[in-house]
Image (spheres, helix red, strand yellow):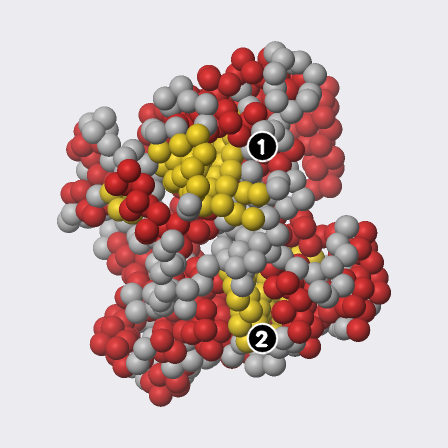
Amino acid sequence: MLEIEDLTSWLPREVVELYQNEGIRELYPPQAEAVERGLLEGKNLLVSVPTAAGKTMLAELAMLKAALGGGRSLYIVPLRALASEKHAAFSRFADLGVKVGLSSGDMERRDEYLGRNEIIVATSEKADSLIRNGARWIRDLSVLVVDEIHLLDSTNRGPTLEMTITKLMRINPEMQVLGLSATVANAPEVASWLGADLVESRWRPVELKEGVICDGILNFPGETVPIPSRRDDLVDLVNDTMNQGGQILIFESSRRNAEATAAKLAKTFSKRRDGPGSGDGQAPGKEGREVSRLSERVLATGESETGKKLAECVRGGVAFHHAGLLPEQRAIVERGFRSGEIRVIASTPTLAAGLNLPARRVLIRSYKRYEGARGMVAIPVMEYRQMAGRAGRPGLDPKGESFLMAKSDTEMRDLFDHYVHGEPEEIFSKLAMEPALRTHLLSTMATGFASSADELKRFVDSTFYAHQQDAWHLDATMEKVLEFLIDSKMVEPDLRPTPLGELVSRLYIDPLTARIVVDSLRSRETARITDLTLLHLITMTPDMDTLYVQTSDGWIEEFIDQHYGELCNEENYDWMMREAKTAALLLEWISESEEEKIADRFRVGPGDIRRVAETAEWLMHSAGRLSEHLELGATFRIYQLEKRIHYGAGPDLLGLLDLKGVGRVRARRLHRAGYTSLDKLREAKAADIAEVVGPKIAEKVMAQLKERA
């Protein structure tokens, strides 16, 4: 066993002492193997070990060694929430003089200021955009860490992750590369592409028992354990977990199911919170007071129907978690679970994607999910392993237990065969998809990685796709994509990028999005372009995830008929319905409708409203840049609409909204009180403004006005 003290052979003593002060005395077996394989000597490694087996600490050690030697590291994660979590965790290195930066937000920025940091955390999309926009510090990396590297297999994120890794290895040939994952079936193949040694292990710091619950019995391989039954396996399992002082994560296939399960359990267990018998030794009623405070914090984020449901569940010590919640609501749930105030979370599978949220038990209640024309489809074994791996809290639980749920003995045997005893699927590159190639071939040429057909072919030959199979399989798709890019005036016939192509690459939009925007603006007289025209235009692009149309959305056809002259041409009526619904939501957003009313009418969560608005703002900005570049005549109106989308406000408030701390609600109050411009605010007394927006905000407003004088 390798002691933490032994690392002084490679690392300064202050680094070793930092970990000793955190209670770490020796390395886990996979960690020791990684060190022996050259982790601290700059060797490339692919680390494929279970959740909680110490992957992140290995990355930390490599990054700290680089930082204290004058080097810089980039840590890539799949989600912004995970980026924030890692940034917060790495920020403790400030005591060592190591600065940590977080890169997120605007895709057209270089973020050169990040070069002042020794460790930078970013999503793969943001890292890709930094390369496209020519961030200088990206060419001086000592260490690249790719967390959740199995997402190379993801249809959505895989191609961007693959091309980002390929480009970074090309830019920094001496850079150390660390790939981290809990599940990579064909790990040797991925390691070979990275030029890395493989550290592969199934060792866990907490034993994981995998089983299936059926008819009140916990079935493990070679063992059955009955639980006190009221003939409801879900309630019985949760009750049994809470009686042991544990927590449980329940994975559902949909938001609706997650909310329904949380509501059912909260109702069942709320009495337990208010009286004796809480099962964890606390005084009667204490838990009830704690979760009441937590519930109030949820309501303080906004009283949408979804928020009210969540707050009610939290009062019972239960929560749900999905993408329809606001980021601040999800953060409250996650903190409440870590602190033990929330004992149960019912979630969609997104919670399994890397967030540090382990539990005593995990229940995968729904192992099938809806996938459009395919109907209900069984989840991959790799996804099951990601969820099951959340069971067991190191230092807190003697073991972790994960369960699938079966309704019959036959189904139980099938689940054992396919999931408990099954092997994860191999991961395959998704680069061959036309939308992925369209985006990434343009950026490859626009950023100077290839300036001829031969150079482009050599670059593609260095991708994971080409490592897995013959790259000539891509030839037909590449030819089609290059023909599209040439026809769209984004690259010349000799494959040199045009100024338009360079702009599209920097904007980080699909070239097809740019083509749709340019063609639509050119085909329409400027005088006939309305706000709705522009909102519909961006919803037609492949970069916008449009809202689903439900049977209760009969009003959409009437909306289309009523506004037909303002809408863009769309041949597919089903697409038109989805686009019109999304554009209508954005129209209500910029008309200052209350979020609660928007959520109710469009049957979405508050998080969905924010996400649609955020995407729309980015696409409207891109449309403005394209209009400006090509002089299409709609530039001013587009930029004004971009700003309105950002704030969710009418055009008459735009001047006031430049003031920090004055959102759309306070701006409207000021406007109604007669303060319609910054000049009129300057003429006012602080006490008068305070009557409208409160003394603290009034003080901030007056300070800003003084600065701008």
Residue 10, position as x, y percentages in the image = 77, 73
Q: Quadrant of the C terminus?
A: top right
* Residue 12 in view in this figure: yes
Q: Quadrant of the N terminus?
A: bottom right
Q: Which residue is mark 1?
A: 246
Give whichever of discs 2 and 1 has the lower sequence position. Answer: 2
Q: Nearer the viewer, residue 566 or 299?
A: 299
Q: Nearer the viewer, residue 188 or 690?
A: 188
- Identity, as a three-letter code, of the amino acid under mark 1: Gly
Q: Is residue 107 above or below residue 664?
A: below
Q: Is residue 692 above or below residue 565?
A: above
Q: Nearer the viewer, residue 561 or 195?
A: 195
Quarter-wise, where is residue 376 in the image?
top left
Q: Nearer the viewer, residue 150 or 474?
A: 150
Horizontal arrangement in the rendering, residue 37 relative to residue 186 (left or right): right
Q: What residue is at 38 percent from the left and 62 percent from the top? A: 153
Where disc 2 sits, the SS reads loop
Q: What residue is at 68 percent from the left and 32 percent from the top? A: 701
Category of crowding for the residue at label 2, using alpha-carbon neighbours closer than 10 angstroms: few (below 14), some (14–19), many (at least 20): many
Residue 226, position as x, y percentages in the image = 44, 30
Select label 2 or label 1 by which is in front: 1
Q: What residue is at 79 percent from the left and 73 percent from the top? A: 9
- Identity, as a three-letter code, of the amino acid under mark 2: Asn
CA separation in Å, label 2 and label 1: 39 Å
Residue 397, position as x, y percentages in the image = 62, 40
Horizontal arrangement in the rendering, residue 115 relative to residue 203 (left or right): right
* Residue 137 in view in this figure: no
Quarter-wise, where is residue 156 in the image?
bottom left
Q: Which residue is mark 2?
A: 44
